[in-house]
Every structure is written in structure tokens, then in C-alpha cells.
Amino acid sequence: MRALHNLILCEFQKFKRRPLFLLATLAAFIFPVLTTLLYWNTPGGQDYDNLFSGVVDLGDYLLLLPILVVLSTSLFFTEQDSDTLKNLMTIPVSKAKLVLAKISVMAIISVVYSLAGFLASAVCAKLLGMAFINMGEKFVLSLLLGFMMLAAALPCVVLVVWFNKNNLISIVITLFYTIVNYVFHLTDMGMKVPVGFNIGTILPIPLIHRWILQFYSRGTETGEWAKFYDSMRPYFVSTPVCIGILAVMSVIFTALMVRIYNRREI
């Protein structure tokens, strides 16, 4: 356990030479500000619930997901690029522990990003005089979203590690994966389906959105919003089910990464 802790610290020290980590951290604070400006001039945008949902929808689904995968390319290819993997093997450090350390770093970054987005959106809402609603619940949702977005990123990370190519190929894979997830979470094919072997359950973003959407519904909506939530209620995913599915996915894709990494030549 201590060896894993030391590996995690070593992975974080590498980010001192990686400006991408700093940019990702800044984005967590800047993006909610941009989302606030976007929602402030729209009908009903002065509501903090709408602002929070916008930060999740755009900040986490469209920005955090690709950030995690791009960061993973830096994490998983550092030893390969610098030809230091063989040195680590002589300590010895198992490749399985290396993979777990890198995934742990991604988890920490994901949670910090999600909580930073929540904090930044709360500050923006306060400055604009928005009424705070269920802040404790939103904090917990942001915390869980951090871990869920890590799970959502892992299938794409497996592809990146498996192809073992340069950053350009990794970016193309990441953009395609992000767009597919985001598009399907806007369609009936991805959203109005029960939990099961279907695109709305296999793709993590539609699954996560069907989970968090129930917390936006307060039962006081009117007009089109009321019709939308009424149509979605049969397809909401409970917290235990969502966490359970994502946990199983995480275990499977982590095991695949360990297998791929173990077979990689030193």
C-alpha cells in the first residue's frame, strides 16, 4: 500500500513539467464563469439549478472527459518516451501497481476538477445574486460525478493504451469517443431506454445523465420542462444501479489495461 502511495506521489511530481495539468486545473475554474455568462442571458438562466446543470453538461461531459483521456496519454507514455520503464522493473515495481497509480492520479484530478467546478459555479451564482438551492446535495453530486467521469474515461483510455500511438492518434480517438457519448445523451436512443444491454447503458455519459437528471427535477416545473421530466421519469437510473454499473465497467477496463501493460515490451 505504501508503495502504491509513493507511486502516486511520483506521478504527480511529473506534472511539474506538464503544462497540460495546469491548464486543466484552470479550466475547472474558468469554464463555470463562461457557462454563467452563457446562461445569464437565456430565459430562466438566472436559476442556480440551471447554472449547475450547465456546468455539468458542458464542463464535465464535454471538457473533463477529454481532459482525463489526454492526461492519461501523458501518464501512460511517460516511461515509454523517456525509456525508464525497464528501470522501474528492476526496483521492482509491478506493472499492475503502475497502472493503479496512474488511474488513482486520474481519479484525484477528476474529483478535484468536478469539485472546483462546483465551487466556481457557486461563487458566480453568489456574485450574480442567484438563490442557492440544495447546496449539500450538489456538493455530493459533484463528488460522485468526479468518480463517475473517471469510469466514463476508462474505456477510451484502454483504446489509447492498446493502440500505443502518438498524441495525435490519441486526440482523434478521444474526440470521437467524447462526441459519440455527448450526442447520444441528447437523443431518445440514448436516454429513453431502460437499464440493460443498450446504447444508453453501455455508453457511460447517457447512463450518468439519466442518473443525475432526477436531481434536477423538483416537481415544480411547468410547460415544456414539466413535459420533459414526466417523459424521462420511467428511465431515471438510481444511484446504486448507476454506481454498480460504472464500478463493474471500471474493474473490467482496469483489468484490460493491466493486461495490455503487462504484455508491453520493455
Image: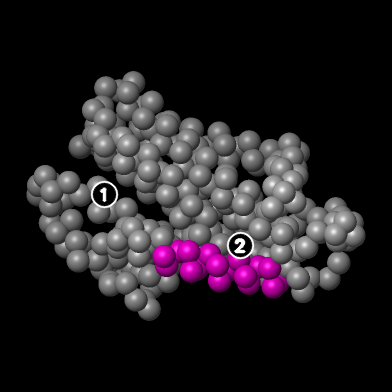
Which residues, given as a range, are shown in magenta?
A: 244-260
Residue topped by disc 2:
157
Tell me which numbered mark, 1 or 2, is placed earlier along the sequence.
2
Mark 1 or mark 2: which is in front? 1
**Secondary element at image label 2:** helix
Residue 143 in percent (x, y) is at 43, 44
Classify 100 as above or below 111. Answer: below
Which residue is more in the foreground, 193 or 4? Answer: 4
Residue topped by disc 1:
215
Amino acid tagged 2: Val
- Residue at image position (63%, 48%) is 105
Q: CA distance from mark 1 to mark 2?
A: 29 Å
Q: Residue furthest bottom?
A: 197
Dot label at residue 254: none
Q: Is residue 44 visible?
A: yes
Classify 137 as above or below 82. Answer: above
